[in-house]
Amino acid sequence: MIECPNTVPTILEIYVRSLRNVKALIPQAAKLHDSLIFRCEFDLEGEPLYTVKWYKGPMEFFRYVPNEDPKMQIFPVSNIQVDLSRSSLNEIVLLDVEQEATGRYKCEVSTDAPNFYTTASSAFLYVVDVPEEDPIMDINRDQSGHTNVIRANCTTPPSYPAMNVTWYINGIKVKETGRKSVSLDPLYAYSKNRRSPYMTISYLEKEIDENIFQSGAIKVQCISTLFNLYKSENVRYIDDVRPQPWPSSVIGSTAANTTGSLIVKTTWACIITMFALIFIQ
């Protein structure tokens, strides 16, 4: 019978022990000027801790070293303010965050001798200036013979990042026809540190028939959202007017539709120009 030397358990223990389950837990998004808590969770599995470090991009801004006095250190990084009195080994508190604090954050954990393991985890944070305005919807009906088509666009207030838009007809989700995001900051191209605000413009084109009308009308909704920080909607109703061919109940005749479309385009051109002038100033 072969007997294993007494050193074998010690060797196995070295291979089993390690640094595991490092997780950076930060909000996906936060409102401008909020205070935030970042957590760094990890399992040392018996290893001695050497350091816990926090980075924004490549820049270290916080360090915890249990064997030093003081244990916590702060390093200056633009637009990051750490509340040292409320920070600790596993969490840090950021105060009055600005939009420039948007970016990728990383917590890095290192063990001490003899193994010196290092593991990191990162997550991205958006700092959002939440708008107070609702989305704006423009809608018309186009009838040609027996066809009946709804054409609509929904424009969100400016935000960074751009908002999501979801359409519903009579409470049923429908797919948008197209979408574009319009930057309102002409200076963005010259400054990497700026976060350009965008308006999202979502388009919907949907052919309908008389069976879709409920209580003599169609309910059209556009809902704009930005993470879990903003949700707003615009609702319009289209009446069912018969006999066929169905006349337009929103804009009017074909000639009126053309005029209404021109007015809508002119209105949004004015809005975009106005926002551009504001940001230029």
Image (cartoon, helix red, strand yellow):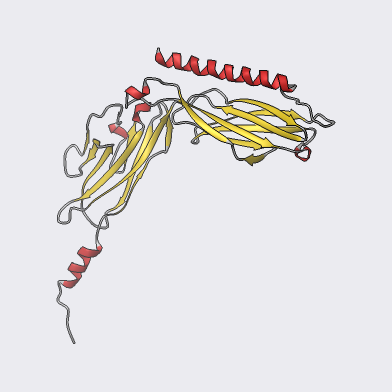
Q: Residue at x 71, y 19 (%)?
A: 256
Up the image or down, 135 lies above or below 106; here it is above
Which of the pair 5/222 is nearer the observer? 222
Up the image or down, 128 lies above or below 28; here it is above
On the image, the x and y values in percent for residue 133 come to 55, 22
On the image, the x and y values in percent for residue 148 come to 73, 34
Asked whether residue 17 is in view, the answer is yes
Residue, far front: 145
Is residue 10 toward the left or the right of residue 245 in the image?
Answer: left
Q: Residue at x 31, y 26 (%)?
A: 79
Which of the pair 65/75 is nearer the observer? 75
Q: Residue at x 71, y 29 (%)?
A: 142
Splitting the image into 4 quarters, where does residue 151 fall? top right
Is residue 161 toward the left or the right of residue 260 in the image?
Answer: left
Residue, far right: 243
On the image, the x and y values in percent for residue 156 come to 54, 27
Quadrant (top left/top right/bottom left/bottom right) for the C terminus? top left
Residue, far bottom: 1
Quadrant (top left/top right/bottom left/bottom right) for the N terminus? bottom left
Which of the pair 197/37 is nearer the observer? 197
Tally the marks: 0
Splitting the image into 4 quarters, where does residue 206 fall? top right
